[in-house]
Image: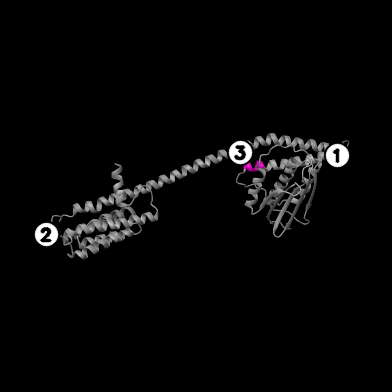
Amino acid sequence: MHFLERVPRLLTGEGPGAPDPVRARRVDLCLIVVCGLLSTLNLQDIHRIGLIDDYATSLAVGWLAAASLYWRRSHPWIPATVAMAATLVSDDRGPLIFAAYALAAYGGSHRFIGGLLMCVVYVVTRDMFLPAGYAGRDPASFVLGAILVPGLYGETVRRNRYVMAALRERARQAHAAVDQAADLAVVQERTRLAQRTHDGLGHRLTALTMQAAALRLDAGADPRVREGAAAVEESARAAMAEVREVLDMLTDPAGRRAYTAPVDVGRFLAALARNMRATGMEITHRVQPGLGAFPAADGRLLLRIAREGLTNAAKYAPGSAVRMNLFAEDGEVRLEVVNTAPEGERIVLDSGGMGLPGLRAALAEVGGALYAGTTKDGGHTLAATLPDRRVLA
């Protein structure tokens, strides 16, 4: 059965799916050659039957009918008309078989009328031009083999093509439904994780903020304790804001509620430096005057770089002096975090190793660059540049 299915497909150029244009044209050219060769062999015996009894003329008409199969997909009426005209020249029915199939497989809504006309024309003309006493004078049997059977097979292939297209569309819709269900499950799981994080970490950060604020407002507390409490309160508030941003990312992966307000990076760096000084770090910072605010994405990226640089200095270079500079020049914004050589014993043994690669990838996405390396005095430099897209007042 598999062999019987492949033979008609080989003769007609049809496969289980729609062929690509290049393959389709190659098949059409092969069918032209096959049809022409069949006509060449057939006309050796029957070229005297018809309006013209010259072999060369009949052969030329046969190959012309075969060549018209090149348009069997786009204009199936062309090979059907040329094949019917060829039957007037001789009784060669080879091109008629291929043309009847093409009309049924690729024709429009009038293909059934076209097939009926082919049958009628063939019956009428054959009865007029066949010689008396010719064994094949009754053309009804040839109509069945040369027109009706190929046409029926072409209609079957046509309907099978539509069925396969419908099945592929249904399969695509089924895959889309599965993907949608998977995405919904991911969103639900993210929402559940965000809720648990908010209930746990959010509650603890809120309590920490309130306790630090109470200590800061305690008039009887030591001034240094109150200053440290203020730093803790500010850090806790910043951490809570970041937690809320992460939770929004979990519950809104499409970014419909993304933060779009400009970010005053200079003000944040000042608060960050003040908080780090409260921990005992020797830090100086300089922000170019009149720098202004940055777009939300660029501002948050600069904040990440500053935090990463100060965190690394605190972990790997205890007792060092840190210098943080933010300025803009030549269409670029540059942020530098430089620390001197460590003066105390390093207490951090290892790291996750994800900070700098993540920053480097984030900067590359916006057309920026990141440099990290040691200085001549044994310190460390973290410098980032990105295009200047400040929000001008």
The reply to whether the magenta stretch includes residue 247 is yes
- Chain-order first, disc 1 or disc 2: 2
Work out whether residue 10 can be spotted: yes
- Observer-nearest residue: 120 or 37? 37
Residue 192 in the image, given as x and y percentages of width and height:
62, 36
Q: CA distance from mark 3 to mark 1?
A: 42 Å
Q: For label 3, count other residues whose C-alpha is less than 10 Å away and answer few (under 14), some (14-19) or many (20+).
A: some
- Of circles 1 and 2, the one toward us is 1
- Observer-nearest residue: 93 or 256? 93
Q: Are marks 2 and 3 in contact (CB under 8 Å)?
A: no
Magenta segment boundaries in residue numbering: 246-251
Q: CA distance from mark 2 to mark 3?
A: 88 Å
Q: Residue at x 33, y 54 (%)?
A: 27
Residue 77 in the image, given as x and y percentages of width and height:
31, 59
Q: Is residue 185 left or right of residue 363?
A: left
Query: Which quarter of the image is occupied by the N terminus?
Result: top left
Q: Determine which of the numbered discs, if any, sits on residue 157 in the image.
A: none
Q: Is residue 107 left or right of residue 287?
A: left
Residue tagged by mark 3?
190
- Chain-order first, disc 3 or disc 1: 3
Amino acid marked by disc 3:
Arg
- Observer-nearest residue: 87 or 318? 318
Residue tagged by mark 1?
224
Q: Determine which of the numbered discs, if any, sits on residue 132 in the image.
A: 2
